[in-house]
Image: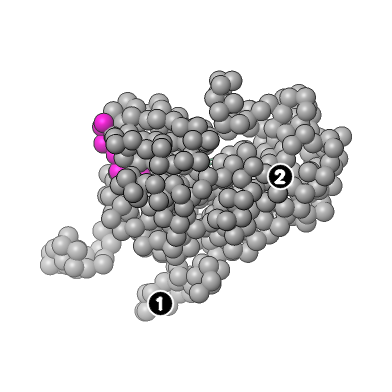
Amino acid sequence: MKPETKAIHRGRSQAAEVAPLTTPIYESTTFVFDSAADVEAHAEGRSARYLYSRYENPTVEAVEGVVAELEGAESARLFASGMAATVTTLAGLLKAGDEVVCCAAIYGGTLRLLTDLLSKFGVRVRLVDLEAFGRPADVLRDETRLLWFESPINPTLRCLDIEAIGAACRARGVTSVIDNTFASPINQAPLARGVDLAMHSATKYLNGHSDVTGGAVAGGTDLMSAVGATRRLMGTILDPRAAYALGRGLKTLAVRIGRHNANALAVAQFLESDRRVRRVYYPGLASHPDHAIAVRQMRGFGGIVCLDLEGGLSRAAAFFDRLQLFVRAASLGGVESLCSLPVLTSHHGLSAEALQRAGVSAGMARLSVGLEAPEDLVADLDRALG
Ligand SMILES: Cc1ncc(COP(=O)(O)O)c(C=O)c1O
């Protein structure tokens, strides 16, 4: 079955006595047992009954099944946010003394989590420039336990060779994790290319309606069992109401992503043809430095486009302030088009050197291209460019 079919049918309830079409919101913190023997059977793993919603919840589990199917994974877990997914995964798989290798061009929250928080618990973090990932085997050392990367990367949409990274990590016994948020599982299948775990800020495309904060991780049963056990301890599971809304969003993921891809390409082509724009970053354009990698590993190029304007922050801010249809807001991946200025949001407070390493300039504006008519979006950008 195709992803759009799986997204609609995999989450349906199996409860024969009521046979609802959709899986209801099981808003119960705890679940009822008939007898001590019943509890014992659960404790010994001989019964599938639920015990407590911080551990597992039927609504959450149904949506986890959808995410696992879409990522082509044996198993998936949902979390209260993308950051909850990241910290639970790292806490579950690492111990003091382990080294994490992370691409220096990465979501700022992930970067700070690694450098400011995990380092307090004895995990060593080594940031590696994007260019070094051209030879991924060379970025790994004997003490490396886990490698974390993104592709495409915010906001330049630079892409890393997923298959090469997955193979290098497997050869050295290093766990590889990709943040697959920007691509979504419709555009990119990292597990099929040899990466161990795919993580998402489900807040973005997976939910797609800017009204749920959530996270997801998908992968093989062994790694996911460790992540799941840590989630029980940390209490980072997604709430059943949020899981229900996320499940509803997922049913239209493939349809939405198809339109995001088409709209973003139309916007990128318009901006590239306009002399008022210094540079456009979109992996679907032949001018993008990683276009060849993107063509090889992506089924569509996603909904994010970044433009760079001559004149630094004041010029980017003037463009930003003139927008009428694109909404001035952080985040991405929803039905409505948004614009943000990376130096004021995702990369705020970074040193000049860190900005340079991330490829971020003051004249950049990042567009999350939504599902509106492309003509209306282009007209708004045309007007805002002045
Ligand atoms: C690529 C990426 N990864 C992870 C996160 C963190 O996700 P959340 O905000 O859902 O915690 C974000 C949030 O902006 C993101 O853009």
Q: Is residue 79 above or below residue 94?
A: below
- Residue that label 1 marks: 18
Q: Position of residue 125 (x, y in %)?
A: 37, 30
Residue lying at 41% horizontally and 55% vertically, measured from the top left: 194
Q: Amino acid at mark 1?
A: Val
Q: Is residue 60 visible?
A: no
- Residue that label 2 marks: 287
Q: Amino acid at mark 2?
A: Ser
**Left or right: 155 as drawn, with respect to 222:** right
Q: How far apart are labels 1 and 2 at the CA level?
A: 55 Å
- Per the image, label 2 sits on a secondary structure element best described as loop
Residue lying at 69% horizontally and 32% vertically, measured from the top left: 364
The magenta span reads 88-97
The residue lying toward the viewer, choosing from 275 and 239, is 275
The residue lying toward the viewer, choosing from 211 and 218, is 218
Q: Position of residue 216 (x, y in %)?
A: 44, 51
**Left or right: 19 as drawn, with respect to 345:** left
**Left or right: 105 as drawn, with respect to 97:** right
Residue 62: numbered disc:
none
Circle nearer the N terminus (1, 2): 1
- Graded by Cα atoms within 10 Å as few (under 14), some (14 to 19) or many (20 or more), the crowding at tag 2 reads few
